[in-house]
Image (cartoon, rainbow, N blue to C red):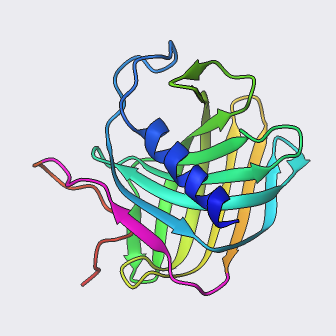
């Protein structure tokens, strides 16, 4: 399981770094600035009406502030099956609550075109919300719940519960100068 998480972490980092390979990504993607792996289980994981188990759950944020909750699916027919709830303008209304409006789903499967040997995600416009309960600053997380619906009516749902182990957090690089995006790692005062 530890090897699976390491491979998943590397896949997320490499797919979140700049790439010109996809016709769907019109411009270069911004660099990842922070990455967190969580330990726990998914009580609900539904992708377009199909139920799945999850192998790993992670969070990453780009230098422009886009935040992502990424889930590696336990799909016996596809070891590359990864979904990402992605959005901008996250907010921290309370110290133990982070809310992220979801405006797109990133869908990776073994059948997608590849860049640098990894599947390039299909991007689906969606409307939805992720709520993370717990405190990223203290590395204590209790749950993540996400729901999103795409323009064709397909639903994506996640209910994740932590096993209580602290998150593994990696700061990849510092953010650019400018107005900072709200991050679940910001200390609320």
Residue at the image position 52 percent from the left and 17 percent from the top = 24
Q: Give above or below for 46 relative to 57.
A: above
Image coordinates of residue 20 in percent, x first then y, are: 40, 18
Q: Give above or below for 90 relative to 136.
A: above
Q: Is 174 one of the magenta-colored residues?
A: yes
> Is the stretch drawn in magenta largely helix, strand or loop?
loop
Query: For the view shown, which residue lies furthest in the top direction?
Result: 23
Q: Is 76 one of the magenta-colored residues?
A: no
Looking at this view, is 121 or 95 the one in front? 121
Image coordinates of residue 78 in percent, x first then y, are: 81, 38
Image coordinates of residue 14 in percent, x first then y, are: 45, 39
Q: Which residues are magenta?
A: 163-176
- Tell me: 127 left or right of 47: left
Image coordinates of residue 40 in percent, x first then y, are: 68, 75
Looking at this view, is 29 or 154 the one in front? 29
Residue at the image position 44 percent from the left and 81 percent from the top = 139
Quarter of the picture holding the N terminus: bottom right
- Tell me: 75 left or right of 127: right
Q: Give above or below for 168 relative to 81.
A: below
Instruction: Choose top left, top right, bottom left or bottom right for residue 186.
Output: bottom left
Residue at the image position 53 percent from the left and 65 percent from the top = 37
- Tell me: 182 left or right of 20: left
Looking at this view, is 98 or 27 the one in front? 27
């Amino acid at each position: 399981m530890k090897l699976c998480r390491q491979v998943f972490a590397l896949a997320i980092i490499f797919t979140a770094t700049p790439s010109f390979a996809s016709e769907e990504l019109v411009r270069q993607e911004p660099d990842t600035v922070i990455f967190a792996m969580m330990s726990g289980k998914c009580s609900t994981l539904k992708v377009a009406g199909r139920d799945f188990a999850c192998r790993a759950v992670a969070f990453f944020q780009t230098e422009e502030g886009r935040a992502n909750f990424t889930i590696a699916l336990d799909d016996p027919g596809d070891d590359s099956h990864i979904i990402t709830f992605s959005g901008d303008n996250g907010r921290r209304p309370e110290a133990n609550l982070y809310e992220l409006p979801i405006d797109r789903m990133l869908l990776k499967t073994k059948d997608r075109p590849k860049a640098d040997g990894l599947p390039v995600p299909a991007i689906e416009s969606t409307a939805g919300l992720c709520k993370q309960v717990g405190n990223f600053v203290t590395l204590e997380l209790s749950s993540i719940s996400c729901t999103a619906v795409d323009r064709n009516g397909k639903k994506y749902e996640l209910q994740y519960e932590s096993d209580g182990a602290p998150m593994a957090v990696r700061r990849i690089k510092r953010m650019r100068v400018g107005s900072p995006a709200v991050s679940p790692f910001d200390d609320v005062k």
